[in-house]
């Protein structure tokens, strides 16, 4: 099998603001380090850090919320209440969670913190929902790509037919059980991140995306897979715009069609490879520096920006 990775990437050109050389950032994954699920934010945080560096800003990837003379871009703000943590003055909170009024992460504590800071959000649906909850200082910063994140070469032997990684529930387990009953080497894993998870991805012919609850497109998880030319079959989602944008790269199907679709693509390596190539192409067309440049166009609105 030919390698998935490529060194070619069309470079984007941006007119940088005059203050660029003076602005300093700390792209920060909220502590504590002992909380394993903080690693779910790692790849997007790394991508943002690389994007800032590529734009010419001084940026570091951090775990410390108190680095001096830097504006913190915080991932995982939704968990900070658990540890009694507060975001430093002038911080930007990058939300990667699904916001559902009265449920999940949409707590009074988090919404109050959102109202006191500039918020970046990957989802227009979230931004509309937050507006109804009185959070209006939100900027749309989609999930982008950076060439440094193209780093999972395929394993010499791809011995996993279908791979699912995520929190278990009955509807997810049922699909894996049906695939195994059909003679497929289908694996499900949870609580695995970083190099150990990437090693599983490298071995997989198909990575499966099944919603846990609401049928909202999990671009946070899937973007990293597409960036590494990994073929994804996903349960359909309610976001018609996302389905349309990613239709050439991802096979979206109804829940009841997931098993049959996996079997069809397992028998067609060329079709899998074509979709994987489209996924990489699509993500390369979403350079993160484009979104960051737009988000930082009005720095006067970002109080407490770190300066040299």
Image: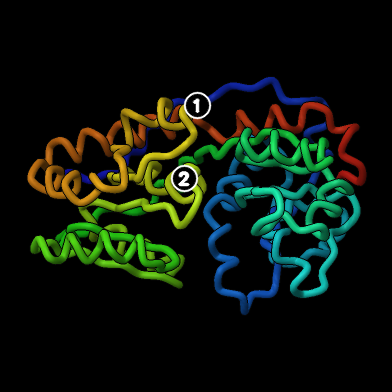
Choose the circle earlier in sequence order: 2 or 1.
Answer: 1
Numbered tag placed on residue 11 in the rendering: 1
Q: Quadrant of residue 291?
A: top right
* Closest to the observer, 258 or 296: 258
Numbered tag placed on residue 269 in the rendering: none
Snapshot colouring: rainbow
Element on which disc 1 rests: loop
* Closest to the observer, 123 or 211: 211
> What's the CA distance linking mark 2 and mark 1?
34 Å
* Residue drawn where x is 12% and y is 43% of the image: 264
Residue 253 lies, in percent from the top left, at 29, 39
Element on which disc 2 rests: loop
Work out whether residue 6 can be spotted: yes
* 9 lies above or below 167: above
* 213 lies above or below 236: below
* Residue drawn where x is 37% and y is 62% of the image: 165
Observer-side mark, 2 or 1, equals 2
* 261 lies above or below 141: below
* 87 lies above or below 284: below
Is residue 78 left or right of 164 when viewed as pictured?
right
* Residue drawn where x is 19% and y is 61% of the image: 178
Local crowd at mark 1 within 10 Å, few (<14), some, or many (≥20)?
Answer: few
Residue 231 lies, in percent from the top left, at 28, 44
Q: Quadrant of residue 167?
A: bottom left
How many tags in the picture?
A: 2
* Residue drawn where x is 16% and y is 36% of the image: 271
User: Circle 2 is placed at which residue position?
Assistant: 215
Residue 193 lies, in percent from the top left, at 45, 67
Residue 228 lies, in percent from the top left, at 36, 46
Which residue is most to the bottom?
34
Is residue 299 left or right of 49 when viewed as pictured?
right
């Amino acid at each position: 099998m030919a390698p998935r990775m490529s060194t070619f990437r069309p470079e984007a050109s941006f007119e940088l603001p005059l203050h660029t050389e003076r602005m300093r950032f700390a792209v920060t994954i909220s502590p504590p380090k002992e909380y394993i699920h903080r690693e779910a934010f790692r790849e997007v945080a790394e991508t943002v850090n690389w994007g800032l560096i590529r734009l010419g800003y001084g940026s570091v990837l951090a775990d410390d919320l108190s680095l001096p003379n830097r504006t913190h871009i915080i991932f995982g703000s939704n968990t900070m209440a658990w540890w009694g943590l507060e975001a430093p003055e002038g911080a930007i909170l990058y939300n990667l969670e699904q916001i559902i009024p009265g449920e999940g992460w949409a707590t009074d504590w988090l919404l109050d913190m959102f109202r006191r800071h500039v918020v970046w959000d990957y989802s227009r649906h979230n931004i509309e929902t937050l507006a109804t909850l009185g959070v209006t200082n939100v900027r749309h910063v989609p999930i982008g790509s950076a060439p440094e994140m193209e780093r999972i070469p395929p394993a010499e032997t791809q011995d996993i037919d279908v791979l699912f990684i995520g929190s278990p529930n009955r509807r997810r387990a049922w699909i894996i059980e049906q695939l195994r009953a059909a003679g497929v080497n289908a694996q499900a894993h949870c609580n695995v991140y970083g190099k150990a998870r990437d090693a599983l991805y490298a071995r997989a012919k198909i990575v499966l995306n099944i919603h846990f609850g609401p049928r909202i497109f999990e671009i946070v998880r899937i973007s990293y897979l597409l960036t590494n030319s990994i073929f994804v079959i996903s349960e359909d989602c309610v976001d018609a715009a996302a389905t349309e944008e990613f239709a050439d790269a991802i096979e979206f199907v109804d829940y009841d069609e997931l098993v049959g679709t996996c079997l069809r693509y397992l028998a067609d390596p060329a079709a899998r490879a074509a979709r994987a190539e489209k996924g990489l192409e699509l993500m390369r067309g979403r350079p993160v520096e484009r979104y960051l440049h737009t988000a930082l166009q009005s720095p006067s609105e970002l109080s407490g920006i770190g300066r040299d």
